[in-house]
Image: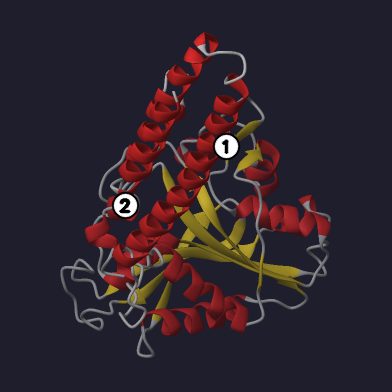
């Protein structure tokens, strides 16, 4: 038995030197020291030895097991270190190589134009006001002098949630909410998303964007309105831009007007863009109707005001020469990359 144990030790020590990865080393450990390993099988024969030899053989076997386990631990650490060095060598990073700059997105054309318009009006002393897109009929229609059965409601093509709640058809409810909680002077713009049940085509969408303005104070006149819109038009479309007011009707303003700007393409001479008229309609405006002021608790004998509203999508299309509103909503990367 002594010879068998010594052979196991010598054979194991020699075999370990030829092992070069951890998988082989584990297989060797199981084969030599496992429950069915060579050393264990030899120790099972100790029962056949004379009683006086068993302690000697047991001590020798334990000594050999300890030696092999110690060598296995040393070999395991050695192989792990070699494996780590190999991996570090293969994964070396050259810190002198320039980094890859991540691709950056850009602002949507609607956002670009909205930021520009907000800057223009903020520069004229306006504040930005916001309100809910799901609105009460009271604020969306009635306080704006559009009572039940008023023909203007048919034009709006409204998305109703129930009899009293709807998706706002314009941002004018924000003006009402502001006047109800803030007494004059009031000077705000109200940008936001609005909804109407329109069929989708090149110029219509059930979802679009508006930006409206409201000024209420003492001695506000139509001249103030024209001055503000003239400054706005020149800032957006160029210093040579002219404005033109045409009589119109809106239930919430009196008098009311539609506002045109001289065509930036032909400078008023007439072209395909302006239908050869030299003018392009951009917004509606007027003096706030006295009934609207009264609904909001403002005395129209003391205060007056003007309001205006424009389609942000239309202004964006005119500014960039976009001929289809659907391009603003379809998220075509080829289109958006141009901005």
Q: Nearer the viewer, residue 312 or 62?
A: 62
Q: Residue furthest bottom?
A: 239
Query: Height in image: 199 above or below 95?
Result: above
The answer to whether any part of residue 323 appears in the image is: no
> Residue 337, position in %: x, y?
27, 66
Assign the C terminus to one quadrant of the image: bottom left
**Residue positioned 25% across, 63% down in the render:** 322
The answer to whether any part of residue 136 appears in the image is: yes
The residue pinned by badge 2 equals 331
| Label 2 element class | loop
| Label 1 element class | loop
Whichever of labels 1 and 2 marks the residue nearer the N terminus, that label is 1
**Residue positioned 43% across, 70% down in the render:** 113
Residue 288 has which mark?
none
Distance between mark 1 and mark 2 Cα atoms? 38 Å
Q: Residues within 10 Å of mark 1 (few under 14, many from 20)?
A: few
Kindly indicate the quadrant of the structure image that contains residue 136: top right
Query: Height in image: 175 above or below 245?
Result: above
The residue pinned by badge 1 equals 150
- In the rendered structure, the answer to whether residue 150 lies left or right of residue 28 reads right
Q: Nearer the viewer, residue 99 or 80?
A: 80
- In the rendered structure, the answer to whether residue 283 lies left or right of residue 297 reads left
- In the rendered structure, the answer to whether residue 166 lies left or right of residue 206 reads right
> Residue 220, position in %: x, y?
69, 76
**Residue positioned 39% across, 90% down in the render:** 239
């Amino acid at each position: 038995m002594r010879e068998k144990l010594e052979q196991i030790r010598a054979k194991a020590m020699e075999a370990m030197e030829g092992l070069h990865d951890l998988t082989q080393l584990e297989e060797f450990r199981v084969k030599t020291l496992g429950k069915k390993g060579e050393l264990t099988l030899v120790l099972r024969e100790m029962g056949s030895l004379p009683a006086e030899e068993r302690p000697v053989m047991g001590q020798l076997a334990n000594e050999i097991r300890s030696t092999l386990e110690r060598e296995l631990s040393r070999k395991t650490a050695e192989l792990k270190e070699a494996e780590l060095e190999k991996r570090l060598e293969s994964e070396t990073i050259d810190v002198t190589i320039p980094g890859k700059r991540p691709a950056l997105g850009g602002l949507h054309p609607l956002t670009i134009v909205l930021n520009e318009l907000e800057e223009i009006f903020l520069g004229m002393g306006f504040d930005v006001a916001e309100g809910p897109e799901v609105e009460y009929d009271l604020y969306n229609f009635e306080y704006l002098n559009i009572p039940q059965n008023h023909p203007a409601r048919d034009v709006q093509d409204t998305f109703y949630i129930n009899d009293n709640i709807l998706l706002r058809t314009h941002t004018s409810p924000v003006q009402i909410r502001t006047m109800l909680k803030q007494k004059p002077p009031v000077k705000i713009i109200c940008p936001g998303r609005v909804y109407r049940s329109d069929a989708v085509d090149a110029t219509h969408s059930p979802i679009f964007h508006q930006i409206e303005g409201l000024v209420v104070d003492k001695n506000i006149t139509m001249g103030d309105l024209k001055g503000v819109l003239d400054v706005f038009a020149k800032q957006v479309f160029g210093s040579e831009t002219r404005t033109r007011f045409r009589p119109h009707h809106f239930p919430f303003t009196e008098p009311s007007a539609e506002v045109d700007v001289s065509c930036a393409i032909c400078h008023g001479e007439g072209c395909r863009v302006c239908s050869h008229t030299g003018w392009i309609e951009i917004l509606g405006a007027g003096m706030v109707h006295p009934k609207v002021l009264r609904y909001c608790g403002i005395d129209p004998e003391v205060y007056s005001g003007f309001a205006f509203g424009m389609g942000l999508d239309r202004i964006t299309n005119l500014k960039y020469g976009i001929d289809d509103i659907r391009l603003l909503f379809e998220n075509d990367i080829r289109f958006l990359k141009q901005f």
